[in-house]
Image: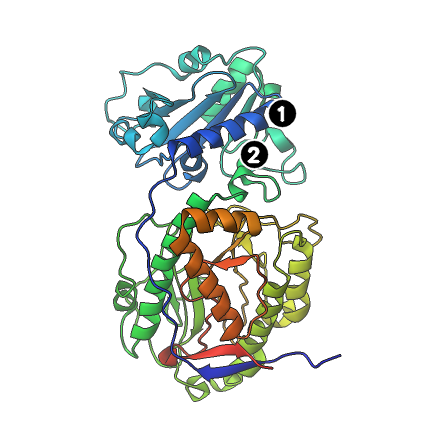
Amino acid sequence: MPAARKHGLVESAWPEFGVGERPPAASVDEFQSRIDAARRAMESRRLTHLVVYGDREHFANLAYLTGFDPRFEEALLIIPLHAAPMLLVGNECEAYLSVSPLYSAGWLRSERFQSFSLLNQPRGNSRRLDEIFRDLGIGKGSSVGCVGWKYFSTAEHPLGPRAIDLPAYLVDTLRELASPENVVNATDILMDPDCGLRTFCSPAEIAYFEYTSILASEGMRRILFGLRDGMTDYEAVQLAGYNGEPLACHITFATSDNRHGGLASPAGTRVRRGDFISLNVSYWGSNSCRAGWAASSAADLPPAAQDYVQEFAGIYFEAMNEWFALLRVGQTGDALHEVIRTKLPFEKFGIYLNPGHLIHLDEWVSSPIFAGSKIPIHSGMVMQADVIPSSATYFSTRMEDGIVIADADLQKKLRAQYPDCFLRCVKRREFMRNTLGMDVTDEVLPLSNMPAIVPPYFLDSNRIFVMGN
């Protein structure tokens, strides 16, 4: 057998893949098709109603179905099996309803429900929740599926599918009207990694996620090339050039003096040569994250970590090459998990979370990649190459960005509808193959403008990993 390929470090200017304009929102017909798909899932489970909750953090399922994301307040979408959907909003969100193509087209009803409004705002000019639900046909004999942001197995909770993460007053009212046994958790209709609706992304979704991935990765690039010994983390993060597009999660910047499990926000600490650093920039549908050292070479690292490239970051790059080589339609999640488990053993690399997960409007949907997973990778999945090593000596390393798994049919549709987006994705894949030497399958479309680029020394970011012959 040929010897296994090893990593190398090369001096290389980063490529320019270009940037695109923000794509238009998905059409009203596409949003209606999502409602129709949800109804087909309801029929298969004999549900008469689907109740979808949203708030500022848990907005993605609601936004996917309607194009509306709650601001300040909560909101609730009720989809009867045979009537127009109804969206309940508070005082301030009424004026924002027109953001939904379904609402603007007259295909989505709305009603003000002031208990969703902030405290001490006017709250006496709306109907009671039970009255609204009754008018939508919820009563004895109804079967109601609740969509929050998590679902639970019986191993996690004794109620299993009847454990529901919506606010109690909503669920209590539904249970009172329909009976407790007829109100179930149906979040998996949208979020299950095998069959969830949001795991089959359309060309319109992919184009938007590519746009936000460019924003995130170009922001990350500016930060890395702008890092200077002595600058504050505030000054570093300002280089990202945030443009106002909604964030999927807070921007992080962890340093040796501001370490909170990698989730630290900028706090005014200074970058010092020899510090470890991890940071991310994340918009809806994207998250660009890197981890390494504020260093120009191994000589800047603590003595115990000066073999960081050879013993840690380089081995990680080799493992991620094998991970990408396996990433194709039909591959099982267990196979992707196993290559990371064997190539990056926990005792040295400390990888605790899933080696890769699905991303959508929210930063983490679910993951098909875990030990023993028989879930096959399918076309339309948008995935984070999110494999997070951790070491007391070497800190971490990362090549976290988004990718699409797309079969020939989905690639054909993307090329026809968003040709510039498609061509950028192909150029990124060819860069990974021809410049980085990575084994990337034809079904992978990288969304980030820094695809698999890993500079171990952030003060010399033109030195990047490649796979040798």
**Residue tagged by mark 2?**
189
The number of numbered badges drawn on the structure is 2
Q: Indicate left or right for 190 with 157 as reference.
A: left
Where in the figure is residue 20, as x and y percent of width and height?
A: 33, 56
Position above or below: 263 against 181: below
**Residue tagged by mark 1?**
45
| Residue type at the position of mark 2 | Ile
Question: Label 1, label 2: how many angstroms apart (C-alpha)?
Answer: 10 Å
Q: Residue at x 54, y 68 (%)?
A: 390
| Mark 2 closeness class: few <14, some 14–19, many ≥20 residues within 10 Å | many
Residue 184 in view: no
Q: Residue at x 59, y 62 (%)?
A: 441
Position above or below: 240 against 30: below
Where in the figure is residue 415, as x and y percent of width and height?
A: 45, 51
Q: Residue at x 28, y 77 (%)?
A: 230
Q: Indicate left or right for 88 with 156 as reference.
A: left
Under circle 2, the secondary element is helix
